[in-house]
Image (spheres, grey):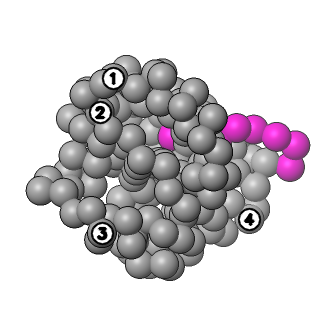
């Protein structure tokens, strides 16, 4: 995969303007149960994506199956987006293996601890990331590609 990322905003300007050019990805897969069933929201998000990039919205637990069903000649051309750690872990547990996880944006709310300028974690989210780390996933806390790499846990 070109990039596996947690970003609660999913598809937005940073993805289109910085991560797509940086990774060279030609396909975006959004693994999100709510969006997978909401065609209107899919259409709205797809408006921002260049026509040269294909987009797919799938259920979290169906991600591995979807990738097996539609193999691509170059897996490095795929950018995978999750809205939270729980979804990334569910996909991992369902057979979608990944070695690196970019944590790009997790909004602050009361009860969360700010661990980088763009990431605030609850105890539950921190525990989820620690579990993935213990499973061998390298956690990369960067909002945009030119930010310094911050590996934690």
Q: Nearer the viewer, mark 2 or mark 4?
A: 2
Residue occupying image coordinates x 28% and y 48%? 78
Q: Which of marks 4 and 3 is in front?
A: 3
Residue picked out by circle 2: 53
From the viewer's side, name the closer residue of 104 and 56: 56
**Separation of marks 4 and 3 at Cα, in angstroms:** 33 Å
Query: What segment carries the magenta color?
Result: 104-111
Which residue corresponds to mark 1? 50
| SS for callout 2 | loop
Question: Dot 4: what SS?
Answer: helix
Earlier-in-chain disc, 4 versus 3: 3
| Residue carrying label 4 | 124
Residue depicted at 50% across the width and 56% down the height: 58
> For the N terminus, which image quadrant?
bottom left
Point out the tag, 1 or 3, that comes first from the N-terminus.
1
Query: Could you tell me which residue is drawn at 33 percent across and 23 percent down?
Result: 50
Residue plotted at (50% across, 79% down): 93
């Amino acid at each position: 995969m070109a990039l596996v990322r947690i970003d609660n905003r999913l598809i937005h300007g940073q993805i289109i303007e910085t991560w797509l050019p940086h990774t060279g990805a030609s396909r975006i897969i959004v693994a999100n149960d709510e969006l997978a069933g909401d065609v209107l929201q899919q259409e709205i998000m797809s408006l921002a994506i260049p026509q040269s990039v294909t987009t797919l919205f799938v259920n979290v637990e169906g991600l591995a199956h979807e990738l097996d069903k539609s193999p691509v000649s170059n897996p490095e051309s795929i950018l995978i987006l999750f809205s939270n750690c729980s979804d990334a872990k569910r996909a991992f547990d369902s057979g979608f293996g990944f070695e690196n996880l970019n944590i790009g944006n997790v909004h602050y709310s009361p009860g969360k601890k700010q661990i980088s300028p763009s990431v605030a974690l609850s105890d539950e989210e921190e525990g989820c990331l620690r579990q993935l780390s213990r499973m061998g996933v390298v956690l990369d806390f960067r909002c945009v590609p030119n930010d310094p790499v911050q590996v934690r846990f």
